[in-house]
DNA sequence: CGTCTATTTGAGATGCGTCAACCGTTGTGG
DNA sequence: CCACAACGGTTGACGCATCTCAAATAGACG
């Protein structure tokens, strides 16, 4: 089962685009000089109902984005990693929660500044459109995974998403840390903590991965994992 | 369980915005004079892998948007109804299928025309951004439902989404046709046909709905349905 | 009237959730 | 420096919601 949310929410944009237009440069430049905010693990970047005053770009760390039902059930809709934008697309009030899962540094750009830039530069609106469209695509991939795949397929997809993310950034695609807890993974994949844990154990016993620590994964048989996934989606 | 995909994919935009800016007018105007295409039920508007040449606005009918896994499992990520835009956000090639579920009329706008308009009007890019952001929000609500809710909650949410859609358009919120098959509903909600069918029957036996035909729903106890849903999300 | 498809219904199997206990690590305070 | 509490993770036993397989029914269409 394909990747899940590794980069679900974010991956919005702002990666330097080759031959980037002035607007993109401006947004990057503006973000680079935007105010910096540090949040500790478990601290909220924003919560449901908060007025939308800023957009944020993760500089270091990681953030979980999730919605909760009235009875407490929780769905993590994505994780934001360095370079990812969060807070886009909310009109007036936030409809979800953004909570750091490790110590995190964020660039904070006031929405007023964003709107002003959009007024001055025709391309910025289009850039934002492309950024949100990418996020939509990853959310749909996650939906496909949670709606159609088995527990094992979901967990494998989740791991492979990390592998591919490392591949893109020229790091070891077979070794990575999981910044989030089992509970975060479970709520992301639509499973329980116990099922996630059992599935990790199963993959370890099958000889496909090693878990020197509970939050460090070493892939020992990438091909077998990919065969188990049954798809190429990335979250 | 809250609504699902009633308007998931689409509901993108183009509803006349009060005090709409010139750009929005232009897009609406441009679409109104765009070429018209008729597709029969089960006919594809586009398929995965097709080059992205146009965006479409549904004028009449309904379209299912879905992704499929290599083994045939299918996830419907949304349904497009009159007024909804489809085909936005795909770069180069479509990554999903759009298939009419009833005879449908579509306005077809070449991407080249859209891009040219975006170049001339700074506000258009922003409009597209807002449209995709709305779609992202409904997809996340669907993700919350498929990831966290029970079969009954999912089906109730699905029905309530139709009710609210009718409410918005000043139609009877307690009577509506379902344009899609049980298979479409099942693949949308992450259930099987049998489970969807049994759940409809259960709601009928409980006295919450009536099913004079399999594709026509009459809600007889809206409050009880809302109590069963456990949330306000709409798809 | 006969075929084809969609839907419903039944019976049985199972994957995952629930409940519960246990383990390892971390951090804190005596 | 050690004891203990708190937390995250693992493992086990069991139950049940949903899936699977199968058959009957109901419409739609020619």
Image: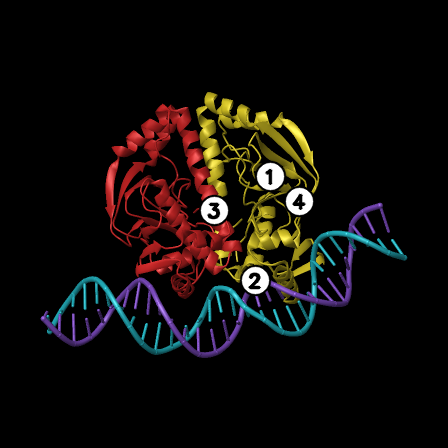
Chain colours: A red, B yellow, C cyan, D purple
Residue shown at the point (58%, 28%) measured from the top left: B109
**Mark 4 or mark 2: whose residue is earlier in sequence:** 4
Q: Which residue is mark 2?
A: B152
Q: Are marks 1 and 2 on the same chain?
A: yes
Real-space Cα separation, disc 1 to disc 2, in angstroms: 31 Å
> Where is mark 1, residue-wise?
B47
Disc 1: CA contacts within 10 A as few (<14), some (14-19) or many (>=20): some
Callout 3 crowding tier (Cα within 10 Å): few <14, some 14–19, many ≥20: many
Residue that appears at 39% across and 26% down: A119
Which residue is identified by label 3? Answer: A233
Q: Are dots 4 and 2 on a single chain?
A: yes
Residues at marks 4 and 1, CA–CA distance in whole angstroms? 14 Å
Residue A77, x across and y down, in percent: 42, 50
Q: Callout 3: residue from which chain?
A: A
| Mark 4 secondary-structure assignment | loop
Q: Nearer the viewer, mark 4 or mark 1?
A: 1
Q: Chain of mark 4?
A: B
Q: Nearer the viewer, residue A148 or A204?
A: A204
Q: CA distance from mark 2 to mark 3?
A: 28 Å
| Mark closer to the chain start, 4 or 1 | 1
Which of the two marks, 3 or 4, is nearer to us in this view? 3
Where residue B30 is drawn, which disc sits there? Answer: none
Q: Are marks 4 and 1 in contact (CB under 8 Å)?
A: no
Q: Is residue B193 left or right of residue A189?
A: right
Pointer 4 residue: B101
Pointers 2 and 3 in contact (CB under 8 A)?
Answer: no
Whether residue A123 is visible to the viewer of this picture, yes or no, is yes
Q: CA distance from mark 3 to mark 4?
A: 26 Å
Residue C7 position, x and y percent, is 69, 58
The nearer-to-camera label among 2 and 3 is 3
């Amino acid at each position: 089962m394909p990747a899940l949310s590794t980069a679900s929410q974010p991956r919005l944009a702002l990666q330097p685009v080759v031959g980037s237009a002035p607007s993109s440069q401006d947004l990057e430049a503006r973000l680079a000089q935007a105010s910096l905010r540090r949040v500790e693990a478990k601290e909220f970047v924003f919560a449901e109902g908060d007025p939308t005053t800023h957009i944020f770009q993760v500089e270091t760390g990681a953030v979980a984005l999730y919605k909760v039902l009235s009875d407490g059930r929780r769905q993590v809709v994505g994780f934001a990693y360095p370079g990812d934008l969060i807070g886009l697309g909310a009109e007036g009030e936030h409809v979800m929660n953004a909570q750091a899962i490790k110590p995190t540094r964020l660039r904070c750009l006031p929405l007023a500044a964003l709107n002003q830039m959009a007024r001055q530069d025709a391309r910025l609106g289009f850039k934002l459109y492309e950024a949100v469209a990418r996020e939509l695509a990853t959310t749909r991939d996650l939906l496909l995974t949670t709606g159609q795949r088995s527990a094992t397929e979901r967990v494998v997809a989740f791991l492979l998403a990390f592998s591919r993310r490392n591949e893109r950034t020229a790091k070891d695609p077979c070794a990575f840390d999981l910044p989030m807890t089992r509970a975060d993974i479970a709520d992301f994949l639509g499973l329980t903590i116990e099922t996630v844990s059992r599935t990790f154990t199963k993959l370890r016993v099958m000889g496909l991965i090693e878990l020197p620590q509970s939050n460090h994964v070493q892939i020992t048989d990438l091909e077998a994992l990919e065969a188990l996934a049954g798809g190429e989606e990335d979250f």
